[in-house]
Image (cartoon, grey):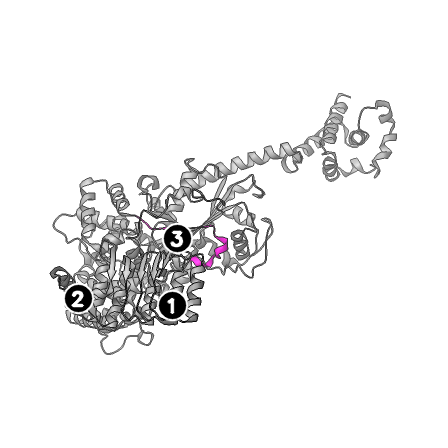
Amino acid sequence: MCLFQSLLRTLMKLKTTGKLKLFQSHLSQVCPECLHSLPEDPSVLDMHPECTERGQEDPEALYIVEKMLETCGIEGSLKITLHILRNMKKKDVTDPLERDEQHNEFKERAQQALKTHLKKRFECIFEVLAKQGHQTLLNEIYTELYITEGGSRGVNDEHEIRQIEIAWKKQTTHETAIICNDIFKPSPGQEKPIRTVLTKGIAGIGKTVSVQKFILDWADGKANQDIDFIFTLPFRDLNLKKKKEREFSLMELLQQYYPQLKEIKSFEGDEVKVVFIFDGLDECRLPLDFQSNEICCDITESSSLDVLLTNLIKGNLLPSALLWITSRPAAANQIPPECVHQVTEVRGFNDPQKEEYFRKRIIDRNKASKIISHIKSSRSLYIMCHIPVFCWISATVLETMLGKVGNRKMPKTLTEMYTHFLLIQTNVKNEKYHGTNETTPKKMSASNTEIILKLGQLALLQLERGNLIFYEEDLRESGIDVSEASVYSGVCTEIFKEECGLDQEKVYCFVHLSIQEYLAALFVFHSCVNENRNVLRAEESKPRSDRVQLSELHRTAVDQALESKNGHLDLFLRFLLGLSLDSIQTLLGGILTQTGSRSESIEKTVLYIKERIKKESSAERTINLFHCLNELNDNSLVEEIKKFQRSGILSNEKLEPHQCSALAFVLLMSEKILDEFDLKTYKTSAAGHQRLLPVLGNCRKAILNSCDLTEKSCEIVASALQSSNSPLRDLDLSYNNLGDSGVELLCAGLMSPNCKLQRLDLSHNNLGDSGVKLLCAALMSPNCKLQTLG
């Protein structure tokens, strides 16, 4: 009887909490015979004699207890009841308090497991090295990057190295610098909260490391502890999911990548703060069709990966979630502007941060000081050190060379630096895998020639396609056996990486775009001098009887680089030409066949480049040609201009157009921004004036009045106005007869979100009605910052 009362009290409690029906449902599955005669109408039970006698108990609960005891006996009824109660507690918590308590328990457990997982995954800066036992902890070496708020949403088509050469001079007091942990914090006075941040920056500038630091500080409990969960979903991993072409829900996707979430059913509602990080938009191979994709609002609803991502970014899925998307500049426009609440730009290291990095990276203070001094002695190297990856390459090379006995010529050009880096990495492999320390370049390189050249073939093919991330089919296309890919990444540990994605599938990449460009150039050069092939020409991909001249290969490469609208072959060209020097070929003796001096071919190439400088109309391509001459150790045009500058007769000399290009190069590469640039100061032709116009990108005030500017000149001026790095604030274009067509071009510049121009003089330019209308429309643009119009 005691057990009867105990069972009855239990069911009465279930009745008061609304769970008795749930108990009946489980009982009908476990013991259907216990309920086979239960009336459909509960009111009938009120007539049950037991109810009349007892008066206090609920008739439905009482009836169930009696039927259970009648059917299963005392012991059986107890076992069934305990089994059902346990099952209900696990799966069917309907009491709000119990449900919240269980939810919080699951959330805390999943959060701690996720933090542990992320800390282990991101605490080392180079995962490949960590596998080999050479861990470099991120927190020991991390140097805060220069990140600015309010970057442009436009697309910059210049080669990324050129963007750095311009951007290093633009770090002004007017810009708002932010640290990565504050990426979602609104600026003072900003009313609307920030949901989606788009962070732009060139390859190797530090976007991924910033993400890594953000996640690690959260996992360590150092920052952003109001966030419950952070999920990083790199596009290189999502590409692998796309290939499987199956549908899944957002919740399923997260649980596949993060098994720590297996007990969590949903993140919907405002009580859970979630951050999604999508790193590497430029690596995305999904269509991201924001216009046509169907709407999806339920995180448990299955859809294609593309639909899930576009709806998450648009805010249809988890509107309360925060999103951080990183991208190289050229791919940033894949996200509609209305979906982005803040744009930031990673500028890499400013000058003090460069020194801080080297002093953290190089333990020996004396060595660190020598390295900093050497870097500062070469303008091109110092500018490149705004890129953290290049700082790492330089530190690796220069620290190794300072540790060698005897006098060694320290690298001063990009090609020299990257060649030494390649040799150092192959030597590291020899020490690790073969226990040898081969110091003879010929021996050291010969053992790795096949691997390096196959990587070079892969680099060239994917460079032409614009790919930085590769998959198994890409490797097979370049003759790399996928089963041996780990050998390739082992040989060139810090050049070519094999990574396991979030779901353990493999992806491959070079550690930086510039290394890919260097190896592509090495493959092309080797094909010419060792195999008599000009692989840049499709019709000459097979060996031919007559000898392919090196100068012929150079001409092909120069022409192709000049034809590129966005300069994507600029750095490749510089490397290809730099590899032609005898000093570089001596270093690469095991890879390249030494067939005597190539000085005659180099002389022909120098002459050809100078001819192209005279004819080339694109200022950006011309500037790269001067860099090419520098790689070939020919600075005659630049030295001639510098001599004029030192003598003070520059303004009195009649300058040829190519001399104007050299002057523009000198002024653009100078350390300081010009306060004022007056085009009339220089005596030259209209073509010469046009060559000087790129200097607008390095001055605060430009005086271009009475210079007979052409429509092409207006294109260059407009380009300067649209550059995200231009310091130009004051522009005088009076007395030029620009006409309506010229004004139309200028208006495009004025309406650019990058344009910071404050004062503009357009007086005496013969504007017609259409020109005035265009100008009025430009002035009405919300992007126009103009304060004074003449």
Kind of residue indicated by mark 2: Leu
Mark closer to the chain start, 3 or 1: 3
At which x and y percent is residue 357? Answer: 27, 44
Vertical placement of residue 254 versus 750, above or below: above
At which x and y percent is residue 296? Answer: 59, 53
Mark closer to the chain start, 3 or 2: 3
At which x and y percent is residue 63? Answer: 81, 31
Q: Which picture quadrant has residue 214?
A: top left
- Quickly name the residue at label 3: 151
Mark number displayed over residue 14: none
Element under disc 2: helix
Determine contact: label 3, label 1, CB under 8 Å.
no
Element under disc 1: helix
Position of 525 with respect to 60 (left or right) is left
Vertical placement of residue 213 versus 625, above or below: above
Q: Is residue 348 magenta?
A: yes
Marks 3/2: CA–CA distance: 36 Å
| Circle 2 crowding by C-alpha within 10 Å: few under 14, some 14–19, many from 20 | some
Quadrant holding the N terminus: top right
- Quickly name the residue at label 1: 743
Marks 2/1: CA–CA distance: 34 Å
Looking at the picture, tell me which residue is in the foreground, 596 or 266.
266
Determine contact: label 3, label 2, CB under 8 Å.
no
What are the residue bounds of the magenta stretch?
332-349
Kind of residue indicated by mark 1: Val
